[in-house]
Image (cartoon, coloured by chain):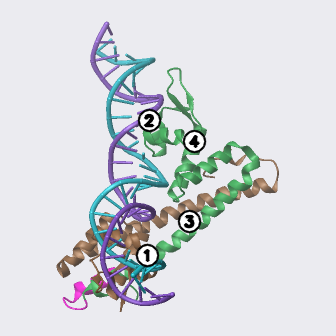
Chain colours: A brown, B green, C cyan, D purple
Amino acid sequence: MSYSIAEAARRSGLSIDTLRYYERIKLLEPPARDSAGRRAYSDEDLNWLGFLTKLRLTGMPIKSMREYASLRRHGVASAGRRKAILVEQRQSVADRIAELQGCLDILDYKIANYEQVERKAFGVAPEMEGISA
Amino acid sequence: MSYSIAEAARRSGLSIDTLRYYERIKLLEPPARDSAGRRAYSDEDLNWLGFLTKLRLTGMPIKSMREYASLRRHGVASAGRRKAILVEQRQSVADRIAELQGCLDILDYKIANYEQVERKAFGVAPEMEGISA
DNA sequence: ATTTGACCTGGAGTGCACTCCAGGTCGTAC
DNA sequence: GTACGACCTGGAGTGCACTCCAGGTCAAAT
């Protein structure tokens, strides 16, 4: 199967402009073209796009995605480096999750404070309170 | 206690330029000044900075932090709205954690693939594999 | 035959969150 | 008394990741 750029955008969740942009900066192999010169994305293209959008969700900068994409073009010899990039990214995602958990605790604490203020009309103004207990 | 801008930067983890920038865009009340006109941050200023940096860690855009900061200046009457902002942000953090968890699973799957490729020198090239099992 | 709509290109513009700079003022150290 | 370092101001510049635009091509629909 092959897909128009509009269809590829719909399926990947990226905008048409972003697809062309990713191609320009070599995140994406230039897809095939139809007889009229329009892009025709393959299933493989869409799989790669799917993975790219996951990497993006992890917060990986485009620079690193480009490195990964470039290694991919260099075949199996680059597998070790590619794996290393993913392992590193895995760590950074795990760290980020821990960081966000910490933020969640602080938000919960602050929200609980506001709830206390709601229950009794007096008390310490929330903006005066420290962050930690 | 009061702190020079360098000390406030050190304690908040923000740069000196960022502190002045935050003041310019009204994330921060202009701190007191010493006799020479230099900024003198109070403990309260630092507490607020601490909370701001936590909000920043959650990915809250500056626009929203400014709204929160502005509400804070409008006193206790704005507590309801402030709480709502925090509750909303709490949700977005929880969503983001879930999203990152999903990414972690995909990374683990991909990494496991690379490990399989390492164990046997042949097999499907990793770049040909789908993302999901 | 022309209108429409999806697509094409190269390049310019946007929003965000800083970050840097030039030129100037203080207070202390020598 | 001057050299130094930390600070000040207004404003310009940066890096990132898009996003938009003008002007053009092409195939199908009216």
Q: Position of residue B104 (x, y in %)?
A: 42, 75
Q: Toward the viewer: B83 or A32?
A: A32
Discs 4 and 2 share one subunit: yes
Q: Position of residue A62 (x, y in %)?
A: 34, 65
Residue under numbered circle 2: B6
**Image: A96 above or below B36:** below
Circle nearer the viewer, 2 or 3: 3
Residue A24: tell me if it is visible.
yes
Determine the residue positioned at 50% across, 73% down: B99
Question: Looking at the rendered structure, which numbered label has been put on residue B26?
Answer: 4
Q: Chain of mark 1?
A: B
The region drawn magenta spans B111-124
* Residues at marks 4 and 2, CA–CA distance in whole angstroms: 19 Å
Q: Earlier in the sequence, mark 4 or mark 2?
A: 2
The quarter in which the N terminus of chain A is drawn is: bottom left
Determine the residue positioned at 73% across, 44% down: B75
Q: Earlier in the sequence, mark 4 or mark 1?
A: 4
Q: Chain of mark 2?
A: B
Circle nearer the viewer, 2 or 1: 1
Residue under numbered circle 3: B93
Q: Chain of mark 4?
A: B
Residue A124: tell me if it is visible.
no
